[in-house]
Image (spheres, grey):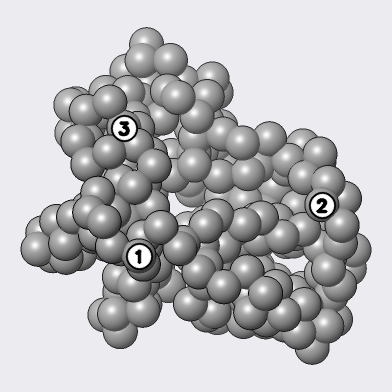
Amino acid sequence: MSGHSKWASIKHKKAVVDSRRGKLFTKLARAITTAARDGGGELEGNPALQLAVQKARDASMPKDNIERAIAKGTGAGADAAAIEDVMYEGYGPGGVALLIEAMTENRNRTGADVRHLLSKHGGSLGEPGSVSYLFDKRGLILVDADRYDEDDLMPAIEAGAEDIAAEEGIFEITTEPTDLTAVRAALEEVEIELQSAELAWLPKARVPVAEDDAAKLMRLIDALEENDDIDAVHANFDIDAEVLERVAG
């Protein structure tokens, strides 16, 4: 399998567990604060804030938390001003390319943490630009293919989706980043239940990974995502679905 849909589905399930611990809420609030700081606190006219708030709602983040995060971003608070977006590039076990998105108020601390985690789990930190050319930024929506068929998803194409692909029981709908919100709205209007909808860095090609390296890679990705400053990890692995289920369990 291509790897992304299955892994994204597994991460979606894990996110539900994370949200119960409150860890996910911290990261979601930071994303909302940053989007509000950069583009203003009104959802209309600020696509980044729309996506951040929708992601928070998907995780059942309380409305009060969302409003506080927006207020923090639009206010004069030093915390919001100090947060910056950083992209780290590197390699994991099996030669897999990694793009690591972070939001941090201390670039030196986060950089050291990323370097340490990569080294500890058999990876290495690369120079800026060393792997980013292997990815394209796209809107990505996942829908359960056991509940719907391709005809049900035609509103997505009409709203501007680039492609609809099905594998391993999941429809993967890709869009231009600027079209993600409109495509999502079109699907929700016809009451299609979405597993997830987000901006993601999708690999142009994938690296086959053996089971031993797959287990190491999943431990590395888990360790990176556990870090409070790391928002998302993108990778270009190609792992068999059954192997992925075993090592991600």
Image point (41%, 58%), residue name: 81
Task: Look at discs 3 and 1 and give the one toward the viewer.
Answer: 1
The image quarter in which residue 78 lies: bottom left
Question: Would residue 128 be found to the left or right of residue 136 on screen?
Answer: right
Q: Is residue 208 visible?
A: no
Task: Look at discs 1 and 2 and give the one toward the viewer.
Answer: 1
Distance (Cα) linking label 3 and label 2: 28 Å
Distance (Cα) linking label 3 and label 1: 22 Å
Q: Position of residue 122 (x, y in %)?
A: 85, 81
Q: Secondary structure at mark 1?
A: helix
Name the residue at the left extreme: 64
Question: Would residue 217 be found to the left or right of residue 131 on screen?
Answer: left
Q: What's the amino acid at mark 1?
A: Ala
Image point (48%, 77%), residue name: 228
The residue singled out by tag 2 in the image is 128
Image point (65%, 42%), residue name: 202
Is disc 3 surrounded by few (<14), some (14 to 19) or many (20+) residues within 10 Å?
A: some
Chain-order first, disc 1 or disc 2: 1
The residue singled out by tag 3 in the image is 46
Is disc 1 surrounded by few (<14), some (14 to 19) or many (20+) residues within 10 Å?
A: few
The residue singled out by tag 1 in the image is 78
**From the viewer's perspective, is residue 99 above or below residue 149?**
below
